[in-house]
Amino acid sequence: MKSKQDLSFWKLWNLSFGFFGVQIAYALQSANISRIFSTLGADPHDLSYFWILPPLMGIIVQPIIGAASDKTWCRFGRRIPYLFIGALIAVIVMCLLPNSGSFGMSVSTAMIFGLMALMFLDTSINMAMQPFKMLVGDMVNEKQKGLAYSIQSFLCNAGSLVGYVFPFFLAWIGIKNIAPDGVIPDTVIYSFYIGAAILIACVIYTSAKVKEMPPKEYAEYHGITEEEKDDDKKSNPVTMMFHLLVKAPSAFWTVGLVQFFCWAAFMFMWTYTNGSIALNVFDAPLKGSVIDTTSTAFQEAGNWVGIYFAVQAIGSVLWAMVIPLFKNRKFIYMLSLILGGIGFMSIFFIHDQYLLFISFLLIGCAWAAMLALPFTILTNALTGGHMGTYLGLFNGTICVPQICAAALGGSILKLMTPEGQVAPEVNMLFLAGVFLVIGAFCVFIIKEKDQKVTASK
């Protein structure tokens, strides 16, 4: 098997640059979905159920994209066609989702429209996002993978930063930040429009700059024989995925356990931060036992959630520069998650909008580790022609915990809510911190030193 040559910094950069635009779309979704559905009339105890769709679509779409792209080759490459089509669909849906309350539909119809738009948005974002991870696995040698995923982490967080601050910035320059009952404010609508434009521009850039390995060259660098190619053509995709899971290295499963607690924690953050900040920091008024979503305080809190998530992204960018300095990946992985756990738990006790910057900087440490270290550990344990399929299957360790957290979050919150009183959403953020600390201790069982597993049947 031939060894891959080192790539220049700018080639590694171009390989992941489109991720910047994809992450803007993802950041707009994660920071504004609870705000959008609360504005449309969703009960706080039901918010987590709206979040089931994104990871559900991810666990379905990403293995399919991985397996399909492993067997694809055309003049545009094997991964790039999928990311381009996914980005194109995302752009269309990003122009529709924030208008869910603007088409004169009833509340229930607007909710259904919003859910359908969210489903298509997350499907397309997953379709565009996964190929970037596969491109690094395909084209970067083991020595540079840590750097390549760190660059991807930097671009991811830079994109998040831009996406998170859009509503706040647009409100600052005078765009209207409040709207009639059931209608999404213009600050959110225009943020999605601008994000869609940046997304397609970034994906076009990567598509133009990156030249993927042709099949023969790819086989030489990944140790794929003609016999294995023939077997792949004859194999049933479902049987093949099951077989690959059986053969998966222990790193796949041990990192997956850590991922479970990490991604469940962040699902709680995306779902409940808006309500937590509105009540704990901005003293948003109530309508009965729920927050008044037409109030200035609620919409201002929504903009500040974007700022806090942007602070998290800044913390992640800074911490991503620190991570490669540690030779012991397990130590820095564990430390990062503990810092993130402290950040989440501190939100429960802080009522000052500026002190919360410290909390979200610490959460950014965990996010940086989650973006870079799991994929570095896994891809270093794999070779062969099913890198994309393995990464698609590994996405299950991201999606399953989010589905579990979304399915159970409402019930957990109800147990914490005294009858007739407003839901204490900040309790869910404290629980998220506990989850990250548990995930940190699970890092001890990760086995990095496995013999490489051939990512082929």
Image (cartoon, helix red, strand yellow):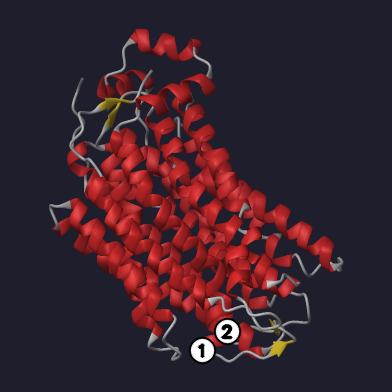
Q: Nearer the viewer, residue 118 or 163?
A: 118
Q: Residue at x 40, y 13 (%)?
A: 229
- Quadrant in the picture for residue 212: top left
- 118 on left or right of 86: right
Determine whether the residue tagged by mark 1 lies in a helix, strand or loop: loop
Residue 278 bears which disc, if any? 2
- Percent across and percent down for residue 384 are 31, 24
For label 2, count other residues whose C-alpha is less than 10 Å away and answer few (under 14), some (14-19) or many (20+).
many
- Percent across and percent down for residue 4 are 21, 31
- Percent across and percent down for residue 171 are 58, 84
- Percent across and percent down for residue 80 are 47, 37
Find out whether the residues at labels 2 and 1 contact each other: C-beta distance under 8 Å: yes
Q: How many marks?
A: 2
- The amino acid type of the residue labelled 2 equals Ala
- The amino acid type of the residue labelled 1 equals Val
| Residue under numbered circle 1 | 281
- Position of residue 78 relative to residue 444, above or below, is above
- For the residues labelled 2 and 1, the Cα–Cα distance comes to 6 Å
